[in-house]
Image: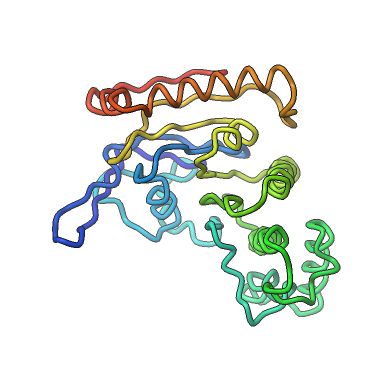
Amino acid sequence: MFSLQNVTKAYVGREGTQVRALDSVTMEVLANRITCVVGPTGSGKTTILRILAGLEVPDSGTVHMHGASARGAAGKIGYLSQRHTLFPWMRVKENIGIPLELNRTPPAERAQQVRALCDLLGLSEAEDRYPYEISGGMQQRAALGRLLASKAPCWLMDEPFNALDELTRHRMQELLIGLVQDRGLSILFVTHSIDEAVFLADRIIVLSAGPGRVVETFDVVMPHRRERLSTEYGRVIERVRRRIESILQEGTGQEQFLSGKMTSDSI
C-alpha cells in the first residue's frame, strides 16, 4: 500500500538545535493487511504516520502509494490518534456522518448508512448520545465508524486502543481484524505493545531508538483469528519479544543503527 524510501525528517528543538526524528527510513506497508510499527519512545513512529497522512513533509526520500507518488492521496487515507477526536457538541451519529456530509451524500441516504455503521459497530443504542455520555470503547468505535464512513481504503492508527482497559482493548482488536477481512482495509498501526503487535499484525516493523531507522522487518504467518492462550501464540510472542528486546536493548539497537544492518524474516 505504502512504501518509504530513505525518508529523513528533522525538527528544530527549543534551543534552535536540529533534532533528527527519522534517518533513512525504508519500509513497505502491506495492502489489505495490518502492518504494526513498534519501537521505543522517540523512534519517530508518529512522524511516519504524519508524513503518510500529508501532515508533514520529509526532508529527503520518497513516499509512494500503490507505486505512485503519495501526494494527492486525499480521501484515500484515514487517521486515528490515541484520542478519539470526536466533536463533543455532536451526537455519535452526527460524528460518524461527517464524511458523508462533506461528500454531499443526500440526508436520507446518509442516515441509512450511519444507521448501518452503528449496527455494525454495536452503537445502535448510543447513536443519539454525545461522546461524553458513552464509554471509551464506544468512543473509539464511533471514531472507527467515522473512518468507515469516509470509505478511505488505508488507515493510519497511532496507538488508538492505548487508553482502554484490557478487555475492551481485546474486543477492539478483534473488531479491527474483522473490518480488515470484510472491507479489505490496509492499516499501519503504531503500538508499544508486543502482544498487540503479534495479535494484529501480518507484518511487524521494528524501529531503533531515535533517530528512528528500520532495524528489522518480519512477517507473522500465524493465521487470524489468533488465540492468545494457544501454545502457538505463546511461542510466537515469546520469540518476537526476545528478538525485539535484543534489538532495542542498550547498545544493540544503536549498533545496528550505526552499521545500517537490517534483517527480514517470517515467524
- Name the residue located 57 percent from the left edge and 35 percent from the top edge: 197
* Residue 159 to residue 200: above or below: below
Q: Residue furthest left?
A: 16
* Residue shown at the point (32%, 37%) measured from the top left: 209
Query: Residue 25: x, y in percent?
Result: 33, 37
From the top left corner, tell me how far across and down residue 201 is, in percent. Answer: 60, 34
Asked which quadrant contains residue 248, the reply is top left
**Residue 80 drawn above or below residue 90:** above
Residue 247 at x, y percent in the picture: 38, 24
Residue that lies at the very extreme toward the bottom in this rendered image = 89
Residue 149 appears in which quarter of the rendering? bottom right
Q: How many marks?
A: 0
Q: Quarter holding the C terminus?
A: top right
Residue 29 falls left or right of residue 64: right
Q: Is residue 183 visible?
A: no
Relative placement, left or right, of 118 versus 152 is right
Q: Residue at x 44, y 59 (%)?
A: 72
Left or right of 17 on screen, residue 120 = right
Against 154, residue 145 (above or below) is: below
Q: Front-most of 98 and 74?
A: 98
Q: Residue at x 52, y 58 (%)?
A: 81
Color theme of the render: rainbow
Which residue is nearer to you in this view: 46 or 6? Answer: 46
Locate residue 246 relative to residue 241 in the image: left or right: left
Residue 1, horizontal then vertical, whole percent: 52, 41
Residue 67 visible in the shown view? yes
